[in-house]
Amino acid sequence: MFQVLGKDTSMVKLGDDWKARMSELAGDGPMRTKLDGLFESSEFTYFYNTEVDVHAFIFQLPVETPDDKIEEFTRVVQEVRSLADYPMVAFKGAPQRCKLVITAETEPELIGKDKTEGFSSGKLFQPIFNSWSDQRKPF
């Protein structure tokens, strides 16, 4: 059985229960308001990587989010997390490894129908290809 911040949960509900437990820990003050702002303005993803045994909680903010806002969200999450006397995630009472990611960066799409303009693989790697074919440059 898993526990998230001291509350019993299942693997399937762990991400949602983590968010709910963080809101409970924040109380009804200004930290709760800021935490709710993070939850509302971001796309939240939880996943468990069984190969390296790490739980990941990821908040993807809009690209235009300023750095100081990201830092504020990070500080609030750390403050709320420190209010719990329990590990973030535990399995059968043993603490599990976790990571929290709060970011506004996006990866360019290199292939597919939603390719990021200017990042097609040909354009991106063309300077490398050109350097290979330029016989005047020794390796």
Image: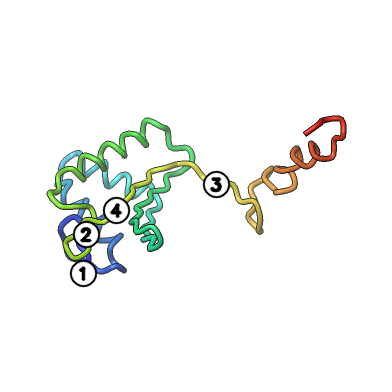
- State the residue position of label 2: 90
x then y, percent, for residue 109:
61, 51
Q: Earlier in the sequence, mark 4 or mark 3?
A: 4
- Say what secondary structure mark 1 lies in: loop
Residue depth check, mark 1 versus mark 3: number of the one nearer the observer: 1
Seen from this angle, which residue lies furthest front? 139
Seen from this angle, which residue lies furthest right? 135
Crowd rating for badge 1 (residues with CA inside 10 Å; few <14, some 14–19, many 20+)? few
What is the three-letter code of the residue carrying label 4? Answer: Arg
Q: Between marks 1 and 4, how big is the CA–CA gap?
A: 16 Å
Q: Earlier in the sequence, mark 1 or mark 3?
A: 1
The structure residue drawn at horizontal position 31% and vertical position 34%, both measured from the top left corner, is 72
Q: Earlier in the sequence, mark 1 or mark 4?
A: 1
x then y, percent, for residue 38:
32, 45
Q: Between marks 2 and 4, how big is the CA–CA gap?
A: 9 Å
Q: Between marks 4 and 3, how big is the CA–CA gap?
A: 25 Å
Q: Earlier in the sequence, mark 2 or mark 3?
A: 2
> In front here: 99 or 33?
99
- State the residue position of label 3: 107
- Say what secondary structure mark 4 lies in: strand
- Say what secondary structure mark 2 lies in: strand
Would residue 49 appear left or right of 117 to someone viewing this image? left
In the picture, the quarter occupied by the C terminus is: top right
Would residue 133 appear left or right of 50 to someone viewing this image? right
x then y, percent, for residue 135:
87, 34
Res 137 → quadrant? top right
- Say what secondary structure mark 3 lies in: loop
What is the three-letter code of the residue carrying label 1? Answer: Met
- State the residue position of label 4: 97
What is the three-letter code of the residue carrying label 2? Answer: Ala
The structure residue drawn at horizontal position 63% and vertical position 47%, both measured from the top left corner, is 116
Q: CB atoms at circles 1 and 3 under 8 Å apart?
A: no
